């Protein structure tokens, strides 16, 4: 497998240092990507870099995932408009353990010849004192060279601390240390890291007379101009506690057709021929959303497991289900998942005493719930057979009691196909 060629057709190369492809075809080597340790979970913005390491390993090379335990204490100015909060060692350790667990779902840490490795740059920086560092490393880089980097120039007007100014030296030394100690000759990363990566190759040349290589990937952008991996509620995380499997699944299902054609190449391991066939089928029948369903299944299964994928898929169908299938789905649903599915649907909270005494469907629709405006409107809707309770049609004689509650606390009212209302029982 030609690693560079694989990335090219997938649209995953932004910059590549001359000679990199030839070197990788000639020699099996180690390469690394750095990951930000500012959270105990990665989000889907990190998936591009994770997939690059996956392809690197599949091509027979050895992938290193570097957790920036030291650089996380400094703060990378790249793409940032202001200084960020620095982390203490206890928080960093917790974050590192969380990130390693997620990386193990993608990378093989037990391969026979090219097992993935996790390293923490705090391990080689913790005993390196300041005077030794500026003498051994700092003397090789001029201030002019460092100030020429875009990540620094963009911050000169608003101000940049010496701490963040020195970041590229610290990251550059990471590359040098891995080159010397792990025979690591390639650094990979996002396009915003090009300046820092090149500083590393320059340090290797100046400090050791050696050659090292670099590849960066483009930052993923959505066709509508909104930021990839972001929703109104924030980042889409890989941790189920931060972003539920249902919401994770929904993010991919709701991708536009244009984005889906991009995502299928970047985030899955289907071959070029398989992807071309999937795209062809999708374009012939876009309403079936084949690409979105394929991506959502592949990623949700990989990150959260097949059971969670099945639950998320069934839950997403619930809004469109009718009859017995819908009733069965509602009977199995958890309160947490119910809240997620019907987030944004108008709700009213009532006391359990009202349900215990028995509540007429008209009261639920009007006085107690507030779904409809008047008893007359409620009775007309019931007579027209357009009202459902928990996905089952009801008439005006229906009396609601505790056995009607979904997950012990919800009533789902519906008028027609798309008008929903939730009564939550305290």
Image (cartoon, rainbow, N blue to C red):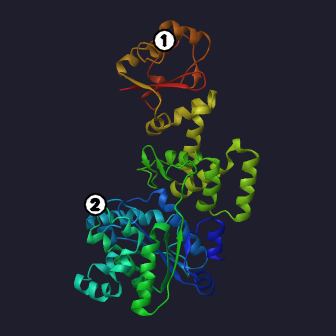
Residue reaching furthest to the top: 376
Q: Nearer the viewer, residue 370 or 336?
A: 370
Q: Mark on residue 153?
A: none
Relative placement, left or right, of 17 versus 66 is: right
Across and down, in percent, residue 218 comes to: 54, 64
Q: Are marks 1 and 2 in contact (CB under 8 Å)?
A: no
The quarter holding residue 3 reads bottom right
- Taking the view exactly as shown, the residue that stands out farthest to the bottom is 209
For label 1, the crowd category at 10 Å Cα-Cα, with few meaning under 14, some 14 to 19 and many 20 or more, is: many
Quarter of the image for residue 176 reads bottom left
Location of residue 342 in the rendering, given as x and y in whole percent from the top left corner: 49, 33
294 or 307: nearer the eye?
A: 294
Q: Which residue is mark 1?
A: 362
The first of marks 1 and 2 along the sequence is 2
Which mark is drawn over residue 85? 2
Q: Is residue 27 above or below residue 300?
A: below
Q: Is residue 69 visible?
A: no
Q: What is the CA distance from the residue labelled 1 to the residue labelled 2?
A: 55 Å
Residue at 61% of width from left, 76% of height from top? 59
Q: Is residue 409 visible?
A: yes
Name the residue located 62 percent from the left edge and 87 percent from the top edge: 26
Is disc 1 placed on a helix, strand or loop?
Answer: helix
Position of the C terminus by quadrant: top left
Q: Residue 393 in the image: x percent, y percent?
A: 59, 19
């Amino acid at each position: 497998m030609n690693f560079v060629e694989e990335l090219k057709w997938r649209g995953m190369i932004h910059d590549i240092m001359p000679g990199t492809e030839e070197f990788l075809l000639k020699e099996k080597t180690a390469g690394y990507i750095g990951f930000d340790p500012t959270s105990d979970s990665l989000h889907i913005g990190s998936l591009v870099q994770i997939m690059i390491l996956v392809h690197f390993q599949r091509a027979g090379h050895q992938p290193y995932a570097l957790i920036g335990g030291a650089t996380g204490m400094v703060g990378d100015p790249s793409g940032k408009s202001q200084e960020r909060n620095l982390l203490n060692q206890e928080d960093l350790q917790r974050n590192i353990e969380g990130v390693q667990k997620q990386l193990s779902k993608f990378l093989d840490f037990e391969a026979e010849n090219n097992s993935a490795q996790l390293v923490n740059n705090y391990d080689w920086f913790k005993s390196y004192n300041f005077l030794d560092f500026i003498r051994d490393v700092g003397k090789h880089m001029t201030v002019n060279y460092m100030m020429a980097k875009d990540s620094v120039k963009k911050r000169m007007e608003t101000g940049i601390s010496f701490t963040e100014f020195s970041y590229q030296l610290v990251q550059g030394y990471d590359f040098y240390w891995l080159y010397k100690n792990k025979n690591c000759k390639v650094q990979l990363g996002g396009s915003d890291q090009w300046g820092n990566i090149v500083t590393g190759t320059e340090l290797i040349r100046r400090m050791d007379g050696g050659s090292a290589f670099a590849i960066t990937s483009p930052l993923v952008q959505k066709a509508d101009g909104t930021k990839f991996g972001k929703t109104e509620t924030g980042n889409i995380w890989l941790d189920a506690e931060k972003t539920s499997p249902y919401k994770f699944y929904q993010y991919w299902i709701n991708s536009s057709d244009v984005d889906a054609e991009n995502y299928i190449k970047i985030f899955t391991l289907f071959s070029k021929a398989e992807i071309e066939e999937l795209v062809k089928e999708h374009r012939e029948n876009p309403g079936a959303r084949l690409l979105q369903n394929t991506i959502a299944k592949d990623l949700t299964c990989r990150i959260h497991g097949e059971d969670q994928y099945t639950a998320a898929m069934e839950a997403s169908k619930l809004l469109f289900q009718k009859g017995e299938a819908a009733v069965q789905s509602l009977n199995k649903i958890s309160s947490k998942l119910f809240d997620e599915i019907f987030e944004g649907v108008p709700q009213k909270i009532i006391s359990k005493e009202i349900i215990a005494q028995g509540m007429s469907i008209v009261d639920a629709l009007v006085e107690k719930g507030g779904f409809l405006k008047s008893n007359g409107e409620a009775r007309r809707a019931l007579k027209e057979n357009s009202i459902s309770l928990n996905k089952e049609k009801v008439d005006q004689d229906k009396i609601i009691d505790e056995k009607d509650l979904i997950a012990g606390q919800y009533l789902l009212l519906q008028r027609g196909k798309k008008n929903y209302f939730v009564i939550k029982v305290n």
